[in-house]
Amino acid sequence: MTRPYLARLTAVFATLGALVSSSPGTAHASAVGSTPVQTFEYSVGGATMKVPTGCMFTHVIRGGGRKITYQNAGVDCAFVAALGNGFCNWRIDFAYADTDNRTYRTSRGKTHYECKIDPMRNNRPQTLPRYGKACAHLYVTGVRRVSQCHHITK
């Protein structure tokens, strides 16, 4: 593994460590979660692309109660996955559901037609009308590939 990839991997783990070890005053109202991106293949312009194991989809949310002050989701890849073409024709959506699991709002992200190894999106601060859950979804060529959710409770 070359130095740039080791440096990137070290930075990813340092960032995750910093987020998880945030101050006790904000930890109860914030959440960080990661879900592995399963290996998959897709076609772009007749070429077959493969996303190998080694990528994580991370969703960060900060705030308190129904108020979200910061929200971000993105992919970090390590090892062999960091050497690939990444994700082409991707978008990240944020969706909000009530306690009965009915989605009442979706913030659809822009579709990015370039290929990127580390797609990421921030969402605007907001106050949700209901308790329930907030989810981030990664779509590649219009197909949902991975999701990560946090419960929003009193």
Image (spheres, rainbow, N blue to C red):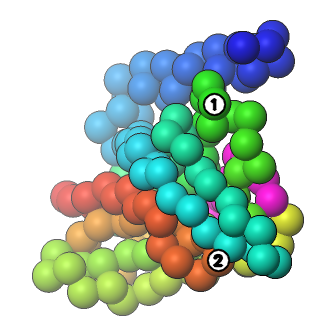
Point out the stretch of residues depicted in magenta.
Answer: 115-126
Give the percent coordinates (x, y) of residue 79.
Answer: 61, 25
Q: Is residue 7 above or below residue 108?
A: above
Q: Is residue 53 above or below residue 120?
A: above
Q: Which residue ends up furthest to the left in the rendered image?
A: 100
Q: Is residue 60 above or below residue 137?
A: above
Visible in this render: residue 79? Answer: yes
Give the percent coordinates (x, y) of residue 66.
Answer: 35, 65
Query: In the displayed structure, does residue 121 sit left or right of residue 23?
Result: right
The label nearer to you, 2 versus 1, is 1
Whether tag 2 and tag 1 are in contact, CB under 8 A, the answer is no
| Residue at the image position 24 percent from the left and 86 percent from the top | 102
| Residue at the image position 82 percent from the left and 18 percent from the top | 4
Determine which residue is flagged by label 2: 141
| Element on which disc 2 rests | loop
Identify which residue, 84 or 119, lies in the foreground. 84
Query: In the displayed structure, does residue 5 sit left or right of residue 26?
Result: right
- Find the distance from the CA under tag 2 to the CA under tag 1: 22 Å
| Residue at the image position 72 percent from the left and 14 percent from the top | 1
Determine which residue is flagged by label 1: 80
